[in-house]
Amino acid sequence: MKTSLHERTLVLIKPDGVQRGLIGEILTRFEKKGLKIIAMRMAWPDSGLAQKHYDMPESDKILLGERTIASYKEKGVDLKKKPVEIAENVQKRLVKYLTTGPVVAMVIEGAHAIQNVRKIRGATNPLAADVGTITADYTIDSYFLSDPDERAIRNLVHASGSVEEANREIDLWFKTDEINDYELAIEKILYSREWEGARKELTQK
Ligand code: GDP
Ligand code: MG
């Protein structure tokens, strides 16, 4: 099966990324990979937009809540709350974080864009992230620090986790006419079969 070269994902450089002067560094990593930025805008989200961004179905709330309960249990803490209640608490923290300052929102396109961007971003928890990823290389936060402070983990970048999430988030942040459908010259080198074999041999007289 042929993979789509036009998979799209939504990326946010969160307020800590902007404040840390890391917009350029972060963009460079995506660009150097061969991914294409097809929309980009700076915005200071209000709580309505942030709430919509972090809105999730009940089933995802339960998963997030259960995961949080399990990670607290490892630390010997019994949260004594229902998963949904915990997830809604996490959401409140996320909204507070995202509305703290301007963010840079973008749509990134390319082969396996969702998976590639997530790999470059690294694990959600910077302490658990592999060296070479954005969360490992540029920030130092962990759930050990953020949870007792009842704040969101500061991980510089958001990236959609699935095709469904990407479609929903792109619609939320960008109008159709803000997204640019264009070709980069390097795409020929990244993806095209025809690029090889271009050398014309000199004919000997
Ligand atoms: P991401 O897509 O990798 O950023 O993570 P998720 O979509 O799973 O979760 C969104 C955000 O919720 C993360 O960036 C974290 O700030 C927060 N979060 C996710 N899982 C946990 C958790 O187990 N504990 C806590 N405290 N926060 C979490
Ligand atoms: Mg996510």
Image: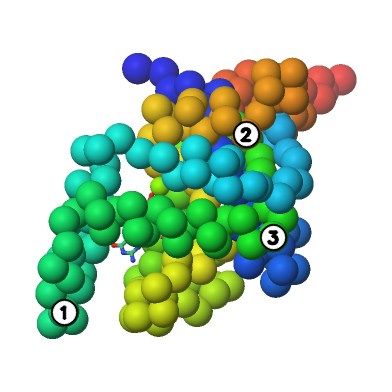
- Neighbour tally class for label 3: few under 14, some 14-19, many 20 plus, Cα within 10 Å: some
Residue position for label 3: 101
Above or below for 84 versus 187: below
Q: Picture quarter containing residue 16?
A: bottom right
Q: Nearer the viewer, residue 157 or 70?
A: 70
Above or below for 161 versus 69: above
Mark 2 lies on a secondary structure that is helix
Please tell me the numbered disc located at residue 173.
2
N-term-proximal mark, 2 vs 3: 3
**Comparing marks 2 and 1, which lies closer to the viewer?**
1
Q: CA distance from mark 2 to mark 3?
A: 16 Å
- Neighbour tally class for label 2: few under 14, some 14-19, many 20 plus, Cα within 10 Å: many
Question: At label 2, which amino acid type do we have?
Answer: Trp
Q: Nearer the viewer, residue 130 or 200?
A: 130
Left or right: 130 with respect to 45? left
Above or below for 127 versus 2: below
Q: In x, y percent, where is residue 154?
A: 51, 68
